[in-house]
Image (cartoon, helix red, strand yellow):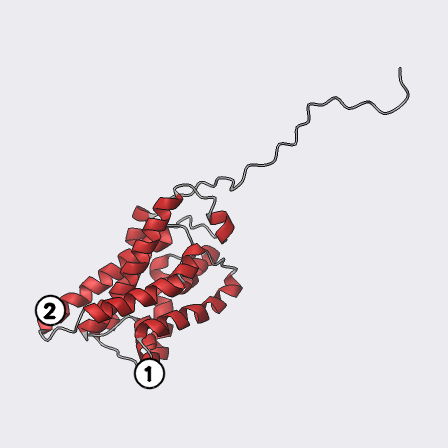
Amino acid sequence: MHLKLENLGPRAQLGLDRLPLRLMVLFAGLCGYGASLALLIRSGLGVSPWGVLQVAIARTAGLSVGTVVVVVSFAVLALWWPLRQKPGIGTLANCVCVGVACDVTLAVVTRPGDLILRAVLLPAGILLNGLSSALYIGSQLGPGPRDGLMTGLHRVTGRPIGLLRPGIEVVVLGSGWLLGGPVGIGTALYALCIGPVVQWVLPRVQITTQRYPITAPPDRSDHRTTPTKGRPC
């Protein structure tokens, strides 16, 4: 299914209809996405491909995972240039909110000692991640830095998201693995499932767009009678 995903800048997004609803959906998706990353980490069964890279960097640099998520998010924005993808309100919010939500969830949720509980956290994290991705993309306020690659390629090539997402994840996974990131059965399960989950959910939560002018055009009408140039009759 080829989705009509808008590629708007921040000013154009302010002219979209149902902006309060879009903002609510956006931040629900961002918070859920950050929480899902933390759930995968706490499962101890493998994290997402991006998580593999981010955890590896966090361990090496001695930083929190959330801090690394923020740094990597801004770095990935540079890859948008060839795709002419426009960062939006949601893009900038994503760069900050996901990392904060991840660190907050890690501080609240501890790693279960029971393998069964850890096995529950794994699919819960994957499903929450896919749902959250679809929510903040569907708000049409700009995809996150990582998903901007996916939606940009989808818009330019017409390839389905279900194929593009796994391709991106494989490249990131290989980089994270080389840096010593945690790879497990959950990593493989995430890479296989996340694309189809997003592709199924996104059309059902996407908010269609209708643009309104941000400011009314000036009234240039002038009812005063102007004299006609030339010789008088």
Of 2 and 232, nearer the camera is: 232
Q: Position of residue 131 (x, y in %)?
A: 27, 56
Instruction: Give the side of residue 232 with respect to residue 150, left or right.
Output: right
- The quadrant in which the C terminus is found is top right
Q: Give the residue at x 35% y 73%.
A: 67
Instruction: Give the side of residue 142 with respect to residue 169, left or right.
Output: right
Q: Residues within 10 Å of mark 1 (few under 14, many from 20)?
A: few
**As displayed, is residue 4 above or below residue 225?**
below
Q: Which residue is mark 2?
A: 117
Rendering quarter of residue 181: bottom left
Q: Which residue is mark 1?
A: 62
Of 151 and 43, nearer the camera is: 43
**As displayed, is residue 17 above or below residue 160?**
above
**As displayed, is residue 220 above or below residue 5?**
above
Q: Give the residue at x 43% y 63%.
A: 149
Q: Position of residue 125 (x, y in %)?
A: 22, 64
Of 153 and 103, nearer the camera is: 103
| Name of the residue lying farthest toward the top | 233
Going by the numbered disc 2, the residue's amino acid type is Leu
Dot label at residue 110: none
* Residue 8 in view (yes/no): no
